[in-house]
Amino acid sequence: MELLSVNLGRAKAVAYTDNPEGVTGIDKRSVDGPVRVAAPGPKGIGGSGLAGDAVCKKQHHGGDDQAVYAMAREDLDEWEGELGRSLANGAFGENLTTRGIDVSGALIGERWRLGPEVVLEVTSARIPCGTFQGHMDEKRWVKRFTQRGAPGAYLRVIQPGEIRTGDPVEIVHRPDHDVTVALAFRAMTTERPLQPRLLAAGEALHPELRKWALEYVEKHGG
């Protein structure tokens, strides 16, 4: 298991973003040197967990529980076949492009060590938005991405430090439940009755998902 690339984005003015300020950091590019990783602060205030990476709509992106976004190279390769075009590492706006890890199959609360220092914890799934669709320039992209059900994972920073392209990735903790990123994604999008199952992930679950799941249980039972 390895980190194929570390990807950073700069704020860029584009016509397709739903950000009122008209800029987005979704166009991320691979960088060679070491990158500092640390908890950025609460959502709405903190941005990316990676130094030099722009988060332009902080009410929806970034913050401690969405500090880092990871995508498997294997999933990008599958999309290449479907779309008929090449997808560089970072093409989906991910900070980390990995190989050898089932990112969407990772458990909420699973912890990864990257290189000698950094430890990250899986919190939730990425939800596609209009900016993502505009960036990809593919018809019905949000629907197609949702139907595939392999969204990649958001992670929080447990132990800060530096990472770089080529670092080994080791899974150092797997929690004792069956709540995967893919399951969380389905519960958030196409299969809302799954939401009570997310509560088995405990405190590791993204606070917003936990709130939604508790509200679902209060309203519908489960």
Image (cartoon, helix red, strand yellow):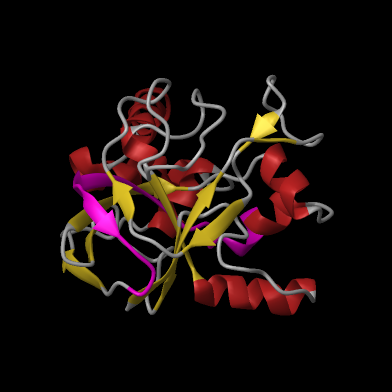
Q: Which residue is depicted at the point 72% across and 74% down?
A: 86
Residue 113 locus on image (x, y percent) = 21, 63
Quadrant (top left/top right/bottom left/bottom right) for the N terminus = bottom left
Residue at point 40%, 41% (across, down): 195
98 up-or-down from 121: above or below: below
**Which percent across, then down, holds residue 92?**
60, 56
Q: Examine the structure image and report whether residue 152 is included in the region drawn in magenta.
A: yes
Whether residue 222 appears in this view of the structure is no
Specify start and end residues of the magenta stretch as a single range: 146-166
Q: Quadrant of the C terminus?
A: top left
Q: Nearer the viewer, residue 167 or 195?
A: 167
Of residue 108 and residue 51, the one placed in the foreground of this image is 51
Is residue 128 in view from this perspective? Answer: yes
Please indicate whether residue 114 sits to the left or right of residue 184 in the image.
left
Q: Is residue 162 above or below residue 26?
A: below
Residue 49, percent from left and from top: 35, 41
Give 35 or 14, whichever is nearer the viewer.
35
Q: Is residue 178 above or below residue 40?
A: below
| Residue farthest toward the front in the current orientation of the protein | 33
Q: Is residue 213 above or below residue 179?
A: above
Residue 65 is situated, as x and y percent measured from the top left of the image, at 33, 37
Is 72 contained in the magenta span? no
Query: Who's the residue at 71% across and 38% down the image?
Result: 130
Q: Quadrant of residue 19?
A: top right
- Total labels drawn: 0
**Residue closest to the eye, 111 or 8:** 8
